[in-house]
Image (cartoon, rainbow, N blue to C red):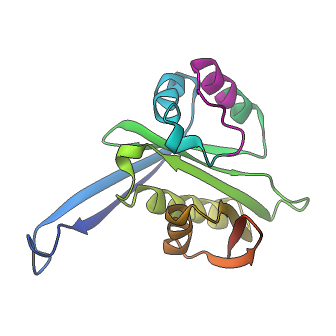
Amino acid sequence: MWLWSARRGFDSLLSPFGEDEKMIKIELRRLKLSDAEALREVAKDKEVTEKLEGFPYPYKLSDAKSYIEESENNPNKYEFAILSGGKLVGAIVLENPDESKKSYEVGYFVSKDNWGKGIATEALKEIVKLGFNKLKIERIWGGVDNDNKASARVLENAGFGLEKELKDSSIYGRIK
């Protein structure tokens, strides 16, 4: 289990010197079947899942259960719940390794009410540490639709660089 916390200051008008700060904590833990209802709650919002490959809309409880069961049974998939304040607010995964298992794709999403709080960026930083330090992965990459600027910023803020621009999407990567 990984625990992360970081400080994010209030608006400079409220805290001109950054003295007043609020603490955001996230926890990453393996996604489990008992998370299905909470996962469905997050993923039932069309705006959350419309850019995610393989997520149907509307997202049903049976979809969440199938997704979690597939993750649990796939030895090449490392799926984690993102928790904030003890509540599941999203998920992050390392999946689709190359043949050598040295390069993995990353995917993530967080609930709409948690957008813009740095949660996805910090979850991504933590899963990168896991991938590089524990799993001995050498490269992690993520693809984003070109109109999904927020997800591109998450990747950039976690140290990923633009590798390739395609017609409708872009590939970002990070090497150990």
Say whether residue 81 is visible: no
- Residue occupying the point 73% across, 45% down: 77
Q: Measured along the vertical axis of the image, is residue 68 above or below residue 104?
A: above
Q: Measured along the vertical axis of the image, is residue 135 above or below residue 86?
A: below
Say whether residue 77 is visible: yes
- The quarter holding residue 130 reads bottom right
- Residue occupying the point 78% across, 64% down: 103
- Residue occupying the point 57% across, 19% down: 61
Indicate the position of residue 71 as horizontal and vertical percent values.
Answer: 70, 35
Q: Is 63 colored magenta in this rendering?
A: yes
Indicate the position of residue 86 as horizontal and vertical percent values.
Answer: 34, 37
Q: Measured along the vertical axis of the image, is residue 68 above or below residue 51?
A: above
Q: Measured along the vertical axis of the image, is residue 116 above or below residue 164?
A: above
Q: Is 173 colored magenta in this rendering?
A: no
The foreground one among 18 and 116 is 116
Indicate the position of residue 51 as horizontal and vertical percent values.
Answer: 62, 49
The foreground one among 64 and 72 is 64
Q: Residue furthest right?
A: 99
The foreground one among 27 and 144 is 144
- The quarter holding residue 15 reads bottom left
What is the number of callouts on the image?
Answer: 0
Task: Tell me: 85 left or right of 11.
Answer: right
- In the image, the segment drawn in magenta is 53-68
Which quadrant is the C terminus positioned in?
A: bottom right
Indicate the position of residue 83 as horizontal and vertical percent values.
Answer: 41, 42
